[in-house]
Image: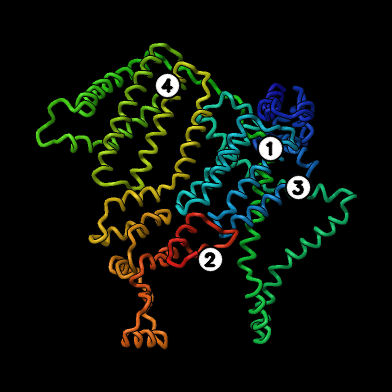
């Protein structure tokens, strides 16, 4: 009998299903010590004294978790038309704005719609927008506007990922008390949030079935059944059309004409985007209600301070000696260097090693703060290490600037300087939290990273690199390496700098074998021009094939960077950076 009671007792408990997180009625229904045991005994179908097997216990736990999840999703279930309509609105905006258009002027429109949907969903669920959430919405809009201002396709792709992360942080901040969350907690919460949202893919169908089951929705139920019949018939119709087309050539001709008009691959692509947008919005809203992330954070500061003092103290002594050498030799320019070294060659080495050590210091300081018990001596050593890290960052910046002076800017060098500036600001927040544990480091870091990244996107690195490279070029001594870098490695943002060189088609064709200027025109117009020149008549000096017209080759450059989706720009796919390139084409718009 003791074993039976023990087996029942190890079933689903309040801790397992986290009934403390249940909203309102769910807490009342799920509270009570006898509730999980009663569920286990009634649903097991076995005698009360019979022990539960592992599979039965697992089945009971999963059923109880499903019951709790369905209870938490009741607000969406009761208001299914509202949330389904909101998700469909988001899906249509997502498809219209981004279909074959990753960087057009509709991108900020899509971001605005996504922000609006998030605010409307929160208000419908009784979650007014928190103060910190407005910063996230404003940052998302800034990224959306910055996307259509650049032709840097790598940055545009990263912008999409950044917007997803901002959306996840917005949802977590709205539905959780995240004041005590640290960086690791937030990253794990984002991962759990997205993973759990994938597990809710069946929820929209369940809510739709429940809504159609109501008597007042009988007409909609019949329409849904009719639509389901059409979807089921689609693969059968496709098979029959292929078989009948092979049986009759005339019928197949009509089918081909219909396919050329309907463009089934385009319809399939659009349908997939609409479905993805709908399920993404609906499931992410549902995941906010089911609360898969544990709100509390465990205090893991149990490490011995004496060990941290010995470990970090020895590192601090080495750093102090290294920083003294940096100040004396590098910053002040005093001291005698090893034979064969000049100050410029000495300064240009060791940059990446210093950057790695600076990042490692940041990780070590954060690890000590998380796992070591509070100690003033440890805090003093960590502050000393943060100060040494600033000196290392200054040394790394000086070395990188000397690199740039000697070898010019590259994308890697520019983003590295940007990263070091951001790291210096983040290090300030880490230094503050050493002495003020209640300082919200994650919010500070999120604001710093967001502002720095938005600044990078709006600054358009490609344009900066183009002007820096062109500044040191001599038009008469351009090489194929210069052409490869300017025309192919840089984005179209560099077009104004390249156009400033006023290269002609003949010059570009000699530098880049990929470019082939327009062939010389033949026919009556050319014959008339030749006859006029033979008779001594004046011409306007225009080159018939554009080979000697400055920047006439820019149309080739535009097609090279715009791709198939932007060769013809309209209102929907208008991109400001690409429009600037078109304006540089002689006679362009």
Q: Secondary structure at mark 2?
A: loop
Upstream in sequence: badge 3 or badge 4: 3
The disc, 1 or 3, on the residue closer to the chain's N-terminal end is 1
Callout 3 environment at 10 Å: few (<14), some (14 to 19), or many (20+)? few
Q: CA distance from mark 2 to mark 3?
A: 44 Å
Horizontal arrangement in the rendering, residue 517 relative to residue 170 (left or right): left
Provide the secondary structure element on which disc 3 rests: helix
Q: Residue at x 77, y 28 (%)?
A: 24
Which residue corresponds to the image point at 37% horizontal and 32% vertical from the top-left? 359
**Which of 385/129 is in front?**
129
Between 395 and 473, the residue placed more toward the observer is 473
Mark 2 — residue?
Answer: 568
Q: Nearer the viewer, mark 1 or mark 3?
A: 3
Local SS, label 1? helix
Q: Which of pointers 2 and 3 lies earlier in the amino acid sequence?
A: 3
Disc 4 or 1, which lies upstream in sequence?
1
Question: Pointer 3: what residue?
Answer: 206
Circle 2 or circle 1, nearest the eye: 2
| Residue 62, disc | 1
Residue 128: percent from left, percent from top: 70, 32
Q: Quadrant of residue 361?
A: top left
Real-space Cα distance between discs 2 and 1?
Answer: 54 Å
- Marks 4 and 2 sit apart, C-alpha to C-alpha, by 52 Å
Give residue 8's quadrant in the image: top right
> Marks 4 and 1: which is nearer the front?
4
Residue 350 sits above or below residue 201 on the image: above
Q: Are marks 2 and 1 in contact (CB under 8 Å)?
A: no
Q: Nearer the viewer, mark 2 or mark 3?
A: 2
- C-alpha span from label 1 to label 3: 18 Å
Where residue 342 appears, as percent x and y from the top left, is 14, 36
Which tag is nearer the camera, tag 4 or tag 2? 2
């Amino acid at each position: 009998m003791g074993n039976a009671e023990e087996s029942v007792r190890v079933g689903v408990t309040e801790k397992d299903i986290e009934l403390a997180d249940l909203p309102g009625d769910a807490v009342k229904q799920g509270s009570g010590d006898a509730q999980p045991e009663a569920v286990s005994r009634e649903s097991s179908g076995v005698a009360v004294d019979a022990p539960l097997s592992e599979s039965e216990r697992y089945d009971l736990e999963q059923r109880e978790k499903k019951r709790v999840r369905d209870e938490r999703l009741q607000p969406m279930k009761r208001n299914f038309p509202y949330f389904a309509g909101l998700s469909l609105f988001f899906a249509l905006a997502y498809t219209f704005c981004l279909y074959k258009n990753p960087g057009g002027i509709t991108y900020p429109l899509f971001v605005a719609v996504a922000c609006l949907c998030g605010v409307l969903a929160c208000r419908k669920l009784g979650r007014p927008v928190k103060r910190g959430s407005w910063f996230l919405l404003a940052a998302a809009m800034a990224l959306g506007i910055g996307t259509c201002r650049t032709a840097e396709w790598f940055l545009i792709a990263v912008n999409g990922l950044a917007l997803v992360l901002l959306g996840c942080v917005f949802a977590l901040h709205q539905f959780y008390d995240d004041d005590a969350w640290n960086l690791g907690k937030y990253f794990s919460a984002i991962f759990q949030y997205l993973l759990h949202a994938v597990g809710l893919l069946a929820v929209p169908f369940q809510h739709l079935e429940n809504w159609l089951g109501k008597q007042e929705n009988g007409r909609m139920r019949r329409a849904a059944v009719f639509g389901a019949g059409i979807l089921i018939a689609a693969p059968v119709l496709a098979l029959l059309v292929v078989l009948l087309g092979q049986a009759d050539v005339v019928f197949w001709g009509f089918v081909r004409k219909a396919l050329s008009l309907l463009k089934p691959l385009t319809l399939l692509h659009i349908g997939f985007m609409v479905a993805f947008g709908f399920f993404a919005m609906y499931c992410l809203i549902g995941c906010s209600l089911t609360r898969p992330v544990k709100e509390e954070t465990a205090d893991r500061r149990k490490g011995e301070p004496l060990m941290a003092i010995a470990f970090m103290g020895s590192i601090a002594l080495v750093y102090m000696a290294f920083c003294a050498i940096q100040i004396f030799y590098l910053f002040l320019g005093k001291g005698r260097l090893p034979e064969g070294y000049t100050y410029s060659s000495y300064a240009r080495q060791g940059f990446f090693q210093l950057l790695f050590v600076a990042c490692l210091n940041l990780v070590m300081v954060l690890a000590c703060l998380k796992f070591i018990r509070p100690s003033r001596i440890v805090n003093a050593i960590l502050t000393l290490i943060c100060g040494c890290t600033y000196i290392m960052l200054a040394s790394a910046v000086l070395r990188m600037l000397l690199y740039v002076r000697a070898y010019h800017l590259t994308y890697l060098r520019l983003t590295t300087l940007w990263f070091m500036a951001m790291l210096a600001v983040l290090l300030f927040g880490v230094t503050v939290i050493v002495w003020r544990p209640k300082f919200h480091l994650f919010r500070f870091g999120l604001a710093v990273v967001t502002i720095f990244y938005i600044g990078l996107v709006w600054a358009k690195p490609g344009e900066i690199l183009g002007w820096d490279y062109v500044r040191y070029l001599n038009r008469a001594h351009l090489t194929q390496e210069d052409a490869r870098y300017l025309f192919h490695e840089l984005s179209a943002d560099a077009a104004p700098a390249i156009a400033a060189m006023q290269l002609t088609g003949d010059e570009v064709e000699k530098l880049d074998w990929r470019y082939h200027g327009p062939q010389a025109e033949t026919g009556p117009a050319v014959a008339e021009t030749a006859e006029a020149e033979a008779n001594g008549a004046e011409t306007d000096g225009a080159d018939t094939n554009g080979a000697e017209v400055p920047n006439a080759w820019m149309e080739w450059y535009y097609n090279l960077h715009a791709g198939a989706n932007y060769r013809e720009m309209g209102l929907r796919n208008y991109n400001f950076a690409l429009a600037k390139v078109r304006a540089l084409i002689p006679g362009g718009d």
